[in-house]
Amino acid sequence: MNDTRKHVEVCFTPGEYAYFKGEYEIVVVIDVLRATSAICAAFDNGVAAIIPVPTVEEARDYKERGYLAGAERKGQIVEGFDFGNSPYSYMREEFKGKEIVLSTTNGTKSLDVAKDAEVVVVGSLLNVTALSHWLSKQDKNILCLCSGWQDKFNLEDTICAGAIADYLVSTGQFTSDEDSSIAAKYLYLSAKDNYLGYLKSSSHRRRLKNLNLNEDIKYCLTPDQTDVIPILRNGKLVKL
Amino acid sequence: MNDTRKHVEVCFTPGEYAYFKGEYEIVVVIDVLRATSAICAAFDNGVAAIIPVPTVEEARDYKERGYLAGAERKGQIVEGFDFGNSPYSYMREEFKGKEIVLSTTNGTKSLDVAKDAEVVVVGSLLNVTALSHWLSKQDKNILCLCSGWQDKFNLEDTICAGAIADYLVSTGQFTSDEDSSIAAKYLYLSAKDNYLGYLKSSSHRRRLKNLNLNEDIKYCLTPDQTDVIPILRNGKLVKL
């Protein structure tokens, strides 16, 4: 009997995307702390579009041409910009209906490597249930692409990817073969009752704590605050 | 107060070694299924030295010059060779006291990328306790380098690395900062009571099962069968 189930797999870092590329119609880009959480928060607040750019220079070019533009590197707002990747930055009244340019350390890099996939959507814990439900109806192979931290594995993106994979496999329409996907599901299942407690020992979280970002972290680790699903269309993220 | 503890960290694949390189005096190369298990079994059987080579061509050159040489790719013995990376291949009487050349899909690749570290030792579940005890006495920073499967993450190497990291941290003399190390410890703790059961869903194990390697797998997943610690000296692995 043929197995007609689609695959849902997890890639831990943008650097490993090359080993997965081409086999998945949908790529879910995940950067829980904080780029993809900020993007979800922005659309939830009525932002019209987000233009993700991989380099600070590109963000600066857009800014000089009059765009609202944000840039973050190593957890901090880049000099010369008014905002970075804090979700709270995107809740301003004046951002509603606007196009915003954004460059971040990890998240916009993942969006850049994944951009040629048939469908690219943005995932975070903020929209994890709405996104998982939508994905379950697509009948496509799905890759959850974690952004990691400076090319290395991180726990929070992996747990979010594991949550998506666990849900999709539970529907009976999807299967996971890669060891990375199996590990992500294990890590999600042991973390799901207390994300904040589970991640308290994580290096990335400790690094952000040093930057006094506790409010951001609490927000980003609180699931299901929005139903928005940001999707990449012609180089811009828009609301599905 | 200064933290004088040394680091023990886990790198999931040879491809990510570049992001860790240089910070660790000791690198532990791990390829549980099956290269580093076979290497431990070989020394336990009295083999004098193993010359790891990254390419099949190099192994063939040695063979033509009269060396005992083995080569494995994708789980199978390469044509023209008499043995690959099955631990049982190395238990022959005629191998005692001999030098053996070996090239494998993943394990010898990791040995090659790590070769410039101050100290390179070989780990597997077969020698995990003896190796962990020895490492705990070195007062050096330690990186556990998993070989993965064709450049991707695998569970069995990660669990072995997690076992080493968990032991070293438990001594109070070591700490782990990287999220990969924290994840490896979590995965080890959930696997440790039943490696075979835990890994039954692993892609790599399923792939090997198709090759009828169940006896090899059972052997490689049975911890603490030997006290040997293979160490790299001038391009050759010898018994410490």
Image (spheres, coloured by chain):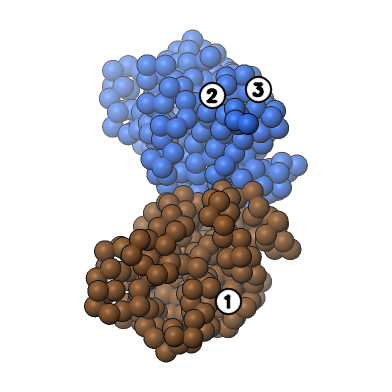
Chain colours: A brown, B blue
- Observer able to see residue B182: yes
Viewer-nearest of discs 3 and 2? 2
* Numbered badge on residue B140: 2
Is A86 located above or below residue B156 in the figure? below
Disc 2 marks which amino acid? Lys
Q: Give the alpha-carbon distance from disc 3 to disc 2, as whole Å.
A: 13 Å
Query: Disc 3 vs disc 2: Cβ atoms closer than 8 Å?
Result: no
Which chain does the residue under circle 1 lie in?
A
- The one of B212 and A150 positioned closer to us in this rendering: A150
Q: Residue at x 53, y 30 (%)?
A: B142
Which chain does the residue under circle 3 lie in?
B
- The one of B84 and B43 positioned closer to us in this rendering: B43
Q: Which residue is mark 1?
A: A127
- Asked which quadrant contains residue B176, the reply is top right
* Numbered badge on residue B125: none
**Secondary element type, mark 2:** loop
Residue furthest top as drawn? B97
Q: Give the alpha-carbon distance from disc 1 to disc 2, as whole Å.
A: 43 Å
- Asked which quadrant contains residue A171, the reply is bottom right
Crowd band around label 1 with a 10 angstrom C-alpha radius: few (<14), some (14–19), many (20+): many
* Numbered badge on residue B133: 3
Question: Position of A66 compared to B211: left or right?
Answer: left
Is A77 located above or below residue B158 in the figure? below
Disc 3 marks which amino acid? His
Disc 1 marks which amino acid? Asn
So how many labels did they put on this image?
Answer: 3
Is B26 located above or below residue B109 in the figure? above
Which chain does the residue under circle 2 lie in?
B
